[in-house]
Image: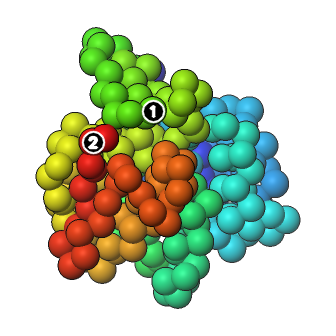
Amino acid sequence: MSALILIVEDEKNIVDILNFNLRREGYDTLEAFDGRTGLQLALEKNPDLILLDLMLPQLDGYEVCRQIREAGSSIPILILTAREDEDDKVKGLELGADDYITKPFSVRELLARVKTNIRRSAMITESADDTDALRFGTLSIDTAGYTVFKDGKPLELTAREFELLKFLAAHAGTVFSREALMEQVWNYEYAGDARTVDVTIRRLREKVEDTPAHPIYILTRRGVGYLFAGQ
């Protein structure tokens, strides 16, 4: 069965370009030209990935992203934005988006991002053969169930957050630069987007650490990168 991609974008010419190229790659697509319809389709149709514009009528992309995550959905969300302001991009990531790409974008690059994120999401079911669990103090990473438990209670992580935590924990004690994490976890490298890693780390700390400002698991090596310190 082909992967289903939901395009939430109010510019018809961009939707037409995305539809043409995505379908040519073998994907099925759904379209929404406003945020309210996009949110409804996201929750009802459960697509494999969402391409989400930020500037939308009725509900903006930030609110759509926030409500999707509050509903407990971990669907990969790739933000499409014409905004150059770094704070706008960071806000989308903090609300739970997996990544962003700035307009005008290369269709080739966008398709590569789509493929990477869908492949990562599919790993949730493919990981059933992996029965190992990583345990550190009150934190348990169930690699088979794609679930993280803290004090015996499951945490709600996006697929990206889980992959980042799993990678760091599997290499506990090793420091990784932002660029290395982009290659190993995001599966692609692109310059100037180190904040993507920083924001995802911050979101993870808010979920797995008792005191995010004083972490004991996910540590920073200033000027170098991040590491997982097993306790």
The circle drawn on residue 174 is none
Q: Residue at x 32, y 22 (%)?
A: 133
Q: Is residue 213 above or below residue 172?
A: below
Q: Quadrant of residue 154?
A: top right
Q: Image check: 106 left or right of 93?
A: left
25 and 87: which is toward the camera: 87
Give the percent coordinates (x, y) of residue 107.
Answer: 36, 63
Q: Is residue 13 above or below residue 70?
A: below
113 and 177: which is toward the camera: 177
Q: Residue at x 74, y 32 (%)?
A: 44
Q: Residues within 10 Å of mark 1 (few under 14, many from 20)?
A: few
Disc on the earlier residue, 2 or 1? 1
Give the percent coordinates (x, y) of residue 176.
Answer: 18, 59
Quadrant where the N terminus sits is top left
Q: Residue at x 53, y 57 (%)?
A: 211
Quadrant where the C terminus sits is top left
Q: Quadrant of residue 162?
A: top left
Specify the amino acid type for callout 1. Thr
Q: Residue at x 85, y 65 (%)?
A: 58
* Residue that numbered label 1 is attached to: 138
Is residue 17 at all visible to an observer of this figure? no
* Residue that numbered label 2 is attached to: 230
Specify the amino acid type for callout 2. Gly
Q: Is residue 223 above or below residue 128?
A: below
Q: Residues within 10 Å of mark 2 (few under 14, many from 20)?
A: some
187 and 37: which is toward the camera: 187
Q: Is residue 92 above or below residue 174?
A: below
At numbered mark 2, what does the secondary structure look like: helix, strand or loop? loop
At numbered mark 1, what does the secondary structure look like: helix, strand or loop? loop
Give the percent coordinates (x, y) of residue 70.
Answer: 72, 46
Q: Residue lying furthest bottom in this view?
A: 85
